[in-house]
Amino acid sequence: MRDPVCGMEVLVEQAEQARLYDDHAGTRHFFCAESCQRAFLMEPERFLAQQQPQAPTGHCELCRKTIHQGESTAPLTIRGSTYQFCCPTCASVFLSQSGERPALAPMPGVQQPANLVERLSRCGLLPWLEQAVRQNASDLFLAVADRPTLKVYGSFKPLNNAPLTADRLSCIIEALLPEAKRTQFLEGREVDVGIGIEGLSRFRVNVFREQDGQAIAFRPLPHRIPTLAELGLPPIFEQLSRCPRGLILVTGPAGSGKSTTLAALIDAINQRDERHIITIEDPIEYVIPNKRSLIHQRELDAHTRSFADGLRSALREHPDIIMVGELRDRESIALAITAAETGHLVLGTLHSGTTIQAITRILDVFEAEIQGQIRIQLTQSLQAIVAQRLLKRRDGTGMVAATEVLLATLAVRNVIRRNALHELRGYIELGVHEGMHALESSITLLVTQGIVGEEALREAASNLAGPIEPDEEPPKRSRVSRWLASSKKSL
């Protein structure tokens, strides 16, 4: 039995138990979720009319599949000729063979719903997004030949649905992407987009291609920005939000909560100070309403071409604070350092494991002959580097952040200037009274408090040990091994 709204297969027994059905015109219709049931009850005739067989309108230009009314993806106009395709994949392959840039033509005779919620409901995506939020999933993955899969506290949980077909995923992408992003995707590019569903959540979305076809990754983002205290971050983060100028970096692997930490810092400033704040993101994740501050949020492609262009433009827009979603390349890093030197507070993220690795990564993007100058600029602008990673709570109720904090004290600035980065670990361990602490200490504290299990110690030890060079003999007892042994004794 198929859902008349989204077309998904529905198990009748489960739908009856959940009362997801409606009797209309002498026929009982079953639904996969409450959202589809509500949509059907509002306009049953429209959804039932869609189930009627449609007359063929043509053939796919690439695979020659017969296309019925309402089944075609948006036609493409190339050099005055219009071509029809059964799915975006066929359109993309055709474009790559022709070497042309397309102009999207309107779909003849097809009424496209303007409301995002209605589009997502019709293609069957909305129920999966609702389940992702309901189960506190960090991610939802859709791919051809796979079942929709949630990632909940680090574990994968496939949903009780049939594997997705290429046509079904094409329908979802068609409903999900605005026209400009859809054009980019048809040209063979992966795209990022942010969507918000009132009463549910915001989502960061990446649409891409892999060996089996198209795929989508969703990351739910709550409408309400959590506070620094709710995130369990140490008091030094509140002090960092009061810095008037300089460079503050939040680092960590993908999915470690860097964007959430930055949003919490911005919101703390927003509630307390009157500042002009410009954010440059890809895409906009948390929507931050004006409170005491004036906030302008800009998104790549929609509002600026790149992080570097956005940063360069921001310097002429009189901000007090600039937040950069990711420092990706040499130009954006150089502009961020320059902005911090000129009296702005710059917040940004990097992909690195520890605070020391963040400094190394910044220096390594520049040529050797100018790294000395960059070190001098860092010593003049750097305020703090925070590294974090998310660990699963012992009771299975969520994730908690373990952090490492490096503050740019006079001693730390001198170490960076001399390029003696190997000495920084000692300054972090000795700077506890100033608010610094190592990642190992943060994890040990979480273990002793019973928040995370001992396996977090072993995982951190393997991540911090690092690879052994081919000509290097393994040390008899590394610093990480000593720390792991002492932590176990303290437990």
Image: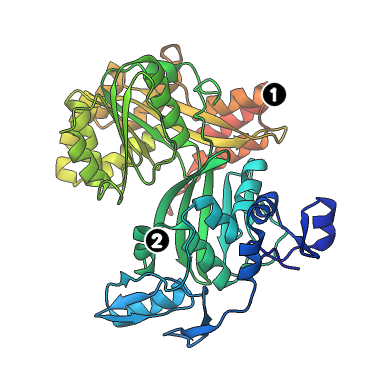
Residue identifier under label 2: 190
Q: Is mark 2 on a helix, strand or loop?
A: loop
Q: Amino acid under label 2? A: Glu
Among the 4 quarters of the image, the one containing residue 183: bottom left
Q: Residue 491 carries which label?
A: 1
Q: Amino acid under label 1? A: Leu
**208, above or below 154, in the image:** below
- Name the quadrant of the N terminus: bottom right
- For the point 19% across and 35% down, which residue is it? 374
The image position of residue 81, as x and y in percent, is 29, 82
Whether residue 458 is visible here, answered yes or no, is yes
- For the point 42% across and 20% down, which residue is it? 268
Q: Nearer the viewer, residue 417 or 34?
A: 34
Whether residue 371 is visible here, answered yes or no, is no
**461, above or below 44, in the image:** above
The image position of residue 457, as x and y in percent, is 61, 34
